Image (cartoon, grey):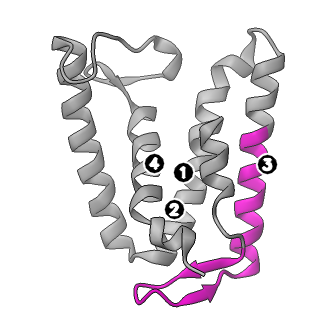
């Protein structure tokens, strides 16, 4: 549920350029963002109500997919596409290294493992993990975008 607070903390309809100036997001992007937020919220509500079934399998993909859409829209408004791709690759490489180290040795995050419900993995870490960590990292780095104005 913490992810909902992160998404809703975006000031809908505004973006911030690299100089810190607030600019308006176009109506199409704004509509896509609100559809993604609604789908994310509905997915989490339904998962809380329904026990098992196909929604349990699809929920991680829908949640991370909708977060990714919002992150990509905000990220491309804040940074150029090349910078966004570099940020994604760095996030994936660093997170894979730390996650794999932790799964194998218990350091630095403790002993745990990922079940197969999160889908295919690279080594021991699911693909979805990379997208979710990238979204979170982009939200933290883009914090200036979130709270300017």
Per the rendered image, the range of residues in magenta is 13-41
Question: In this view of the protein, which residue sits in the foreground, 19 or 80?
Answer: 19
Question: In this view of the protein, which residue sits in the foreground, 45 or 85?
Answer: 45
Q: Quadrant of residue 112?
A: top left
As drawn, is 99 to the left or to the right of 56?
A: left
Q: Quadrant of residue 148?
A: bottom right
Q: Position of residue 13 (x, y in %)?
A: 71, 76
In the image, what residue occupies the spot 46% across and 41% down? 132
Q: Nearer the viewer, mark 4 or mark 2?
A: 4
Give the mark nearest the N terminus, 4 or 2.
2
| SS at badge 2 | helix
The numbered dot on residue 72 is 2
Q: Position of residue 38 (x, y in %)?
A: 79, 48
Which residue in the structure is indicated by mark 1? 68
Spatial separation of the CA atoms under disc 1 and disc 2 = 6 Å
As drawn, is 88 to the left or to the right of 59?
A: left
| SS at badge 3 | helix
């Amino acid at each position: 549920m913490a992810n909902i607070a992160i998404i809703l903390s975006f000031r809908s309809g505004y973006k911030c350029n690299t100089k810190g100036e607030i600019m308006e997001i176009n109506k199409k992007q704004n509509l896509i963002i609100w559809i993604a937020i609604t789908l994310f919220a509905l997915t989490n509500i339904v998962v809380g109500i329904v026990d098992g079934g196909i929604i349990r399998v699809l929920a991680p993909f829908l949640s991370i997919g909708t977060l990714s859409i919002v992150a990509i829209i905000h990220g491309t408004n804040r940074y150029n596409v090349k910078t966004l791709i570099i940020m994604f690759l760095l996030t994936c490489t660093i997170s894979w290294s730390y996650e794999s180290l932790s799964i194998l040795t218990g350091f630095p995050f403790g002993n745990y493992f990922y079940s197969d419900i999160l889908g295919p993995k690279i080594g021991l870490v699911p693909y979805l993990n990379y997208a979710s960590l990238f979204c979170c990292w982009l939200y933290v780095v883009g914090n200036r975008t979130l709270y300017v104005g």
